[in-house]
Amino acid sequence: MNNYQEMWRTLGLNMEAHDQLLQVLPPTYHDVYLTQANRPQGMEYFDFVVNEIHGLRIQELQEHKKAGGKVIGAFCVFVPEEIVRAAGGICIGLCSGVEIGTAETEKVLPRNICPLIKSFMGFKLGKVCPYFESCDIVVGETTCDGKKKAFEILNDYIPVHVMETPHMKKNRDRRLWLEEVRDFARVVEKATGHTITADNLAKAVQEVNNKRRALQRLAELRKQDPAPISGKDSLLIEQIAMYDDVARFTAKVNALCDELEEKIKAGQGVFPRKTPRVIVTGTPMAIPNWKVPHIIESSGAVIVAEELCTGLRYFENEVAEDGQTKDGLLENLAARYLGINCAVFTPNTGRMDRLLQLVEDYHADGVIHCALSFCDPYAVEANRVEKTLKQHNIPLLKIETGYDQEDSGQLKTRVEAFIEMLG
Amino acid sequence: MYAGIDIGSRTIGFVVVSGGQVTYSSIADTGFEPLNTAKNLLTGKYNRIVATGYGRHAARSAFAHRVVTEIKAHAMGAVHIFPSARTILDIGGQDTKVILLNEHGAVIDFQMNDRCSAGTGKFLEVMAAALGYPGIEDFNAAALAGDNGIKISNMCTVFAESEAVSLLHRGIPREDIARALHASVVERTAGMLRRIGFNPPLVFTGGVANNGCIITLLEEKLGTEVLIPPDPQLVGALGAALAAQNDSAVG
Ligand code: SF4
Ligand code: SF4
């Protein structure tokens, strides 16, 4: 591995805390990922990316910045990365999937708040995330109250631009959201010093659509039995999608899909045929939050789809490419993003319909609903999910858990029992 | 000869079946080295061993051929004893489970208590000690004789303990406090049963099913009869032994 110490220091990381973070990651990664049987060759690239998570990619960001480019961070799949790209910036999904700097964080946030919010605050206060430290601005959104209010506090440490995301999908909400998207374009233009034009926006839309298509292609292949790739690997790819270079990532996913197609033709998979198939749904799982998927796939089931923002919600809808003008394209963008079935919408029937469709398309035997602790939108919406699935006789397991490992034993028992029930 | 072993937090149960009949069983305190305790229980040669309970995975690496969860084990064991069972309540040393079965005895839903020990065997043990009863049996007997007058409002083991002690200091009869503590366990358990929408017949397994006071209060509260297996603590191990036997039947 390269020596990145100097780069990290220049970024102002807290070297000691950062070291601690790096020490947890590799062993976890090894146990969770590298011990899987029959992994596709194509995973090599993604292993490499994780290995270099604070290295090569950060170096690329620094080079981009040296050349005058800007880096913009986001916490939610509502933030249109196309706009950032059009203006020559790089959009990075900030992960926040691990507990860090808890004591520092609890100075500014209440103790009973979702681990995701706690985590991003901890990353910033603890100065451990080189992505965060590379950002010129971060973009927040008003999806849930916890985040909305936490962004005010985060703004004390880094400039935060907040987009107002509606909580309904009526016409006036669409108008509001379109205005927010236009505002965001202006903010990005100002930050980058580049004008967004119909041309550069059309190109960005196409590039990001290509990324989504590659992910859709991968998702499509997972309908096969035996499953050609594990759910854990798929989740990892989806997590990496949020911060890797768009064109390179797209090419690598497509190459992996080529390999998987060959495997499918040869009847090969990563789990035996007839392994119970589950769909995971609920609060997004930011890198490196692999706890639940790992428990599921080491208990004898395979995850065939993620109805998550680190999953299908991120890539299932494309932006219409037919816009001729900048404004037309911005309208297309706004429309695409409002199609996301986030639990902060009321009602959110789209999510229920989608889940039923997924169970059918992926021949799933059951659904596991996983909400982060204190995540009200998903924990409450679990009731709607349960009602819908019950009506269709689809087995469901509901889990609420955080980033700690204390409940692993109990979770394992519940997940195993659920899988026994399916088998 | 098929063996089932249930490695729980408090006790380890061991059952051997042959031709669907129990030929041997034993039980031991888990102790500090569960795996050793478990190994000492294995006294003969078995065609197959299936482990269950929280120590099942450790047993799988050490000697067992396969694992099943406590949920499945209790379901199989209870249905073997009471074929018509539709709901199982299992209160063990550190957790409580409710298991719903369909008319064929297959698990269709289940619930487990959260991470704390409120309402479990551990809770009752702590309370027996707090009230100065020499053993859990004395505590149960006292509770049966006690009156229904008072109510314990805290469910958390730590707070309930101090509540019980302060009631004692206020001169409330010990039996009545014992009664109230039992009632609070039943209250919590009944809530769990109702939440999952239980159906009778209800089978009660696990160590706490030896507690006559809990049984009586539970029957009153639910208005239905509660079936108790002959060795409620061994139901999980029995289920595991039956799973071992089934494995051989299919392959
Ligand atoms: S769940 Fe909602 S708020 Fe969270 S990332 Fe997804 S869209 Fe954004
Ligand atoms: S939607 Fe849920 S997980 Fe996301 S920030 Fe809000 S409470 Fe946390």
Image: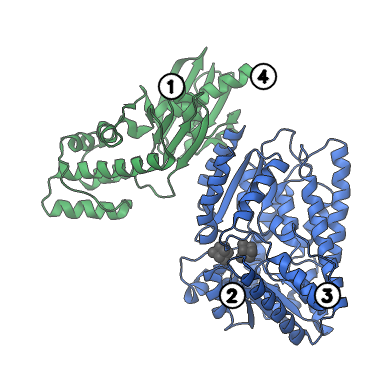
Chain colours: A blue, B green
To the question of a shared chain for discs 1 and 4, the answer is yes
Q: Which residue is mark 4?
A: B251
Q: Amino acid at mark 4?
A: Gly
Q: Which residue is mark 3?
A: A201
Q: Which mark is residue A384?
A: none
Q: Which residue is mark 1?
A: B84
Q: Quadrant of the C terminus of chain A?
A: top right
Q: CA distance from mark 1 to mark 3?
A: 67 Å
State which mark lies toward you, 1 or 4: 1
- Residue A60 visible, this orientation: yes
Label 4 resides on the chain identified as: B
Q: Residue at x 84, y 80 (%)?
A: A197
State which mark lies toward you, 3 or 4: 3
Q: Quadrant of residue A318?
A: bottom right
Ligand 1 contact, mark 3 (Cβ < 8 Å): no
User: Does residue A195 lie above or below B179 as drawn?
Assistant: below
Q: Which residue is mark 2?
A: A126
Q: Is residue A379 left or right of residue B230?
A: right
State which mark lies toward you, 2 or 4: 4
* C-beta proximity under 8 Å, tags 1 and 4: no
| Helix, strand or loop for disc 3 | helix
Q: Quadrant of the N terminus of chain A?
A: bottom right
State which mark lies toward you, 1 or 3: 3
Q: Position of residue A111 (x, y in %)?
A: 46, 68
To the question of a shared chain for discs 2 and 4, the answer is no
Where's ligand 2: which quadrant? bottom right
Q: A251 or B101: nearer the eye?
A: B101
Q: Residue at x 85, y 72 (%)?
A: A202
